[in-house]
Image (cartoon, grey):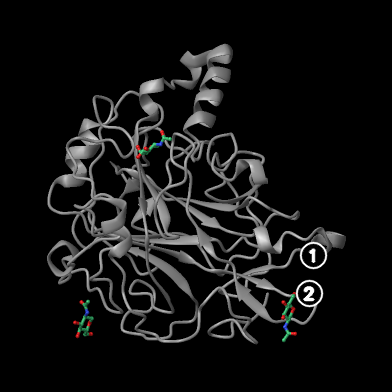
Amino acid sequence: MAWAKGVLISLAALLVQDVAAQGISAKGSDFLRFGCSQLVIERTDPIVNPGTLYTPHLHQIVGGNSFNITMDPMTIDPPKTSKCTSCRMVEDFSNYWTASIFFRSPENGTYRRVPQMTNGQLNGTLMPQEGGITVYYMRPFSGTNKKTTVFKPGFRMIAGDPSLRTKPSGPMMNCHRCLSKSERTSGGSGAPCAPTDTAEFPKKPCPGGIRVTVIFPSCWDGKNVDSPDHRSHVAYAPGSSNLASDKCPATHPVRIPQVMYEVMYDTSEFANPEYYKDGKQPLVYSFGDTVGYGAHGDYLFGWTDGALQRAMDALGTNCFSESCPVLKLQSPADAIACTKPQQAKEEVSSDVWLKEIPGSPMMR
Ligand SMILES: *[C@@H]1O[C@H](CO)[C@@H](O)[C@H](O)[C@H]1NC(C)=O
Ligand SMILES: *[C@@H]1O[C@H](CO)[C@@H](O)[C@H](O)[C@H]1NC(C)=O
Ligand SMILES: *[C@@H]1O[C@H](CO)[C@@H](O)[C@H](O)[C@H]1NC(C)=O
């Protein structure tokens, strides 16, 4: 889970400090939080490399099954072209994708994909899903105006940058949390990308897994559904907090829901302390990043007309997390049953040792 408990703890701490100065209220913590099972793991990326099979690096993809190598913003309509979604919210045919992580055997240099695992629910039981991603849509965390304007059809964006090998400045928006065995379902405590989380890969064994958090920008230029770098049409809110207030810069004046992913990697098999000696760690992202600063996520909007706006407007009254009466929830079994065959066919099983990571990325 979830940081709901962590946020409450942080809120309690803030209350003791100076809640007026922080401007945070418990009501402000309202968000949708739901699971999406794995659709497919493959080398495709309709945002960065449209039309390409076997793109440079491997992703896990979730959401509407109309996901394809080309998803032109002017013509695609995921709610119309999808027959199912792997997300619990049936009106959500968006696609969400993030990079795979590999374990490199210190003994012989071969690689195994670290399995994806499910996240915890807010009551401390595991989400009934297959791998996948936990998706959040959040209202402003502080400030008085909780209204958000949801994305237009065709909208897409990227958070983080796979080419980064140095620590980005500013609030941490992409981070890793190293979980102990007992934190497997709770996700540990503290708000997302708390000071104890790290922009780089953990430097110690994580027997309960690694939770990667990706926090997207909360401000939009109000015009463009995409931009050449897939980033500059959106912006992070000013300030030192990664969970945004209701403020936006003049260049990007429209407050959009803040999207956040939690992605769980099962490192329990790779938690031998020997692998972490002398400042080393054995993990590498599918794009050859051995440090972890390149953590990133891709988002392609695809809700049915009006559904997400309805939910965002209902937050703070009777809509919270997966329990949101203005949206329809499908059974975990139906979400799990929505999958896609690989289009870029190749071995990606987490049971198999590989000589090379798919795409043979440069290691750096
Ligand atoms: C994917 O795109 C191809 C054409 O590029 C099309 O033939 C196919 O039907 C599409 N698949 C889905 C699931 O939309
Ligand atoms: C490489 O090392 C791993 C353990 O790190 C082992 O499980 C695997 O069988 C080895 N592969 C070969 C080809 O020796
Ligand atoms: C935990 O929450 C889920 C989702 O609301 C529910 O289906 C499940 O029964 C709950 N489990 C327990 C033990 O409370």
The residue labelled by disc 2 is 106
Instruction: Name which residue type carries label 2.
Output: Pro
Q: Is residue 75 left or right of residue 5?
A: left
Q: Quadrant of residue 164?
A: bottom right
Q: Is residue 269 left or right of residue 327?
A: right
- Give the quadrant of the C terminus: bottom right
Instruction: Name which residue type carries label 1.
Output: Tyr
Residue 332, horizontal then vertical, whole percent: 31, 52
Residue drawn at point x = 61 percent, y = 60 percent: 293
Query: How many numbered marks have been drawn onto this rendered protein structure?
Result: 2
The residue labelled by disc 1 is 275
Q: Vertically, is 113 above or below 190?
A: below
In the image, 187 versus 248, the foreground residue is 187
Residue drawn at point x = 75 percent, y = 55 percent: 203
Residue drawn at point x = 66 percent, y = 56 percent: 200
In the image, 330 versus 244, the foreground residue is 330
Task: Count neighbours of disc 1 (C-alpha within 10 A) and say few if under 14, some if 14 to 19, many if 20 or more.
Answer: many
Is label 2 within 8 A of ligand 2 (CB to nearest ligand atom)?
yes
Q: CA distance from mark 2 to mark 1?
A: 7 Å
Q: Vertically, is 235 above or below 43?
A: above
Question: Mark 1 and mark 2 in contact (Cβ < 8 Å)?
Answer: yes
Q: Quadrant of residue 52?
A: bottom left
Q: Is residue 197 left or right of residue 349?
A: right
